[in-house]
Image (tube, rainbow, N blue to C red):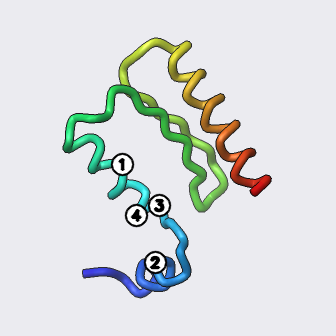
């Protein structure tokens, strides 16, 4: 069952953390995910980073590419 907050977010075109994880799970379930890095901010303001097994240089590269993509999206 979809929560009211999830319904509202979907209607407004927003991606919630729950929806993001659901989207990511599709890649995992289809065995399309080779490497993953995740950065989250908790409600208390803590920042946590998790990553799958791989080279640290690849993790850093993914974060840098993600940063560039977010900056590009901000410019649009």
Q: Which quarter of the rendering shows the N terminus?
A: bottom left
Report the Cα–Cα distance between label 2 and label 4.
Answer: 9 Å
Question: Which residue is labeled 3 in the image?
Answer: 17
Question: Which residue is labeled 2 in the image?
Answer: 10
Q: Which quarter of the rendering shows the C terminus?
A: bottom right
Q: Residues within 10 Å of mark 4 (few under 14, many from 20)?
A: some
Q: Determine the image quadrant of residue 63.
A: top right
Residue at the image point whose x is 31% and y is 80% from the top:
2
Residue at the image point whose x is 55% and y is 13% from the top:
57
- Dot 2 and dot 4 residues touching (CB under 8 Å): yes
State which tag comes first along the sequence, 2 or 3.
2
Question: Which residue is labeled 4 in the image?
Answer: 19
Residue at the image point whose x is 61% and y is 37% from the top:
66
Count of marks placed on residues: 4
- Dot 3 and dot 4 residues touching (CB under 8 Å): yes
Picture layout, residue 50 above or below residue 1: above
Report the Cα–Cα distance between label 2 and label 3.
Answer: 12 Å
């Amino acid at each position: 069952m979809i929560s009211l907050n999830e319904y509202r977010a979907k209607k407004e075109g927003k991606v919630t953390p729950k929806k993001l994880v659901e989207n990511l799970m599709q890649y995992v379930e289809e065995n399309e995910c080779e490497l993953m890095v995740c950065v989250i901010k908790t409600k208390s303001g803590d920042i946590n980073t998790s990553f799958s097994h791989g080279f640290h240089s690849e993790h850093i590269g993914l974060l840098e590419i993600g940063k560039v993509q977010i900056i590009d999206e901000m410019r649009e």
